[in-house]
Amino acid sequence: MTSLDSSTPIDIGSSLELLVDDHLIAQLVGGAELRLNRPVPQEIALRTDAPWEGNASGGFTVFEDDGLYRMYYRGQQFDYSGNRLSRPRGKNICYAESENGIDWAKPELGLVEFDGSTRNNIVVDGGEILNGLFSPFKDSNPDCLPEERYKSLALMERGEARGLWAFSSPDGIHWKEMSDCPVLTFGPFDTQNLAFWDGARGEYRSYQRNEFRLPQTGEEPYGAHPTAGGQSGDRADVRGSRYGRDILTASSPDYIHWTDPVYVNYNDGRPDELYTNQVWPYFRAPHILLGFPTRYVERSWSDAHEDLPELEHRRMRADISERYGAAITDSLLMSSRDGYNFHLWQESFIRPGLRPVDNWTYGDNHQNWGIVTTRSPFAGAPDELSIYFNEGYWRGESTSLRRYTLRVDGFASLQAPLSGGELITKPLIFAGRELALNFSASAAGSVRVELLRDQMNTPVEGYSLEECVEVLGDDLERVVRWKSGQELAGLAGVPVRLRFVLSDADLFSFRFRD
């Protein structure tokens, strides 16, 4: 084993650590590598087929609220006629709920009139909300007022004022404005505009889309950051240029007064334009923010498009605007430990797939905002993670929202073949009495763990690889044992490295605990 340079120990305490980035990794050995995992498609969870919804419904937000699953989304219809795109009816903010995150209902709220009746699931009149997108969250700030327990942002324009207004609600159903002017004003704001309480950092954070000038001939390559230091660019300086899509972030102590937005930063540059961002603290490891940006890939129309599904529909779109027919969207995964610097996986998190309809055009494959747990279809098995993706955008009279599932913590993993591989961490300081792993192995596979002294990189007595009881099976929280036992309290607070040795296995996360 190659000797490793020492570095400042990372204090992870008893936090759950996901294998979604290289933050804790000092060395990978043999066939070990970090690999992206892809969710499994399940049933259609919701169809936006009510008269006040339609085929341009989107901007879905889903979260679990004390046993009740809440969903918010825009209801809207697009129509193609005479080589133009029209909106035959207005935007409505709709609401659905579920007892399990699988079976959804649209309650009659009696709040907003549509065609002379309030028997609908419209929760907010979207007439003044320019993009019809309204993405609530339940505020976990311990200082939050009960009457403001639920919050959202919405794009509006009143006179000369244009930007994001802050809204609040005591129950997630009855909403009011929190200020008489926009709280954020920089950006086009034409996609989902998100904000939430970041408990790990003690502040509110917002994420929204902005535009930047795409590099011209002879300039820096496309993957370069659009502006130095993440500062906001000035559109007026590059008038007439083609623009790309990227993500801005800002922070606030009170949800009303925000810092100037800055572009987020990526580990290896941006592979394509990023549309929505869907950043959210992962509920099992809130110090890690997970994002699921929609990747927007725009190509000029070519013969290659003739081989993609739904050619007639694609040509009709292209007749209105080339990008409507030629652009394609799918989903990516990114993560951050400070809210600004993101590890962006360059491969697709969910591909459009082997399907003849509803998934291969611009507007499809947008992920909802929020991650929830749902029951497994297998008796006795642990709960799964559920996320939701839209299908059939701009077709017919409705869109569909399909549920996808993933094992808990299963976004990415350390994987090794049967021939084996290893991960050695940077020096860590932990708190707790035992080490638990979320892992999966084959019948022939296994995981073993060794504790190394920080400076010497030699095994801690009693915790060597040879003394580790082989970890077999598939589990969300398997406690590692050594022949001397599993007690680690004597090492808490002392810098150590972990050496994970895998054979035909995946390691998704680990945690020291009492």
Image (cartoon, grey):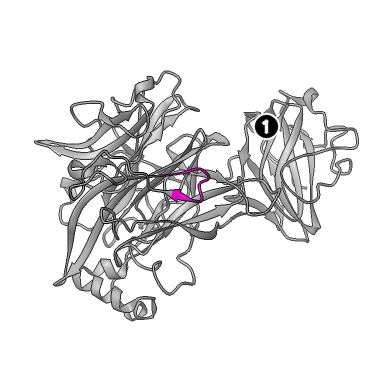
Query: Residue at 21% of width from left, 65% of height from top?
Result: 79
Query: Residue at 36% of width from left, 79% of height from top?
Result: 304
Q: Is residue 259 visible?
A: no
On the rendered image, what quadrant is the C terminus found in? top right
Viewer-nearest residue: 192 or 12: 192
**What x and y, as percent, mark residue 445?**
79, 56
65 displayed left or right of 277: right
Q: Is residue 264 visible?
A: yes
What residue sits right under mark 1 in the picture? 428
Q: Is residue 504 above or below residue 284?
A: below
Q: Is residue 514 above or below residue 350?
A: above
405 displayed left or right of 402: right
Which residues lie in the magenta part?
97-104
Q: Main secondary structure of the magenta part?
A: loop
Viewer-nearest residue: 252 or 63: 63
Question: Which secondary structure, mark 1?
Answer: strand
| Amino acid at the residue labelled 1 | Leu
| 24 within the magenta span | no
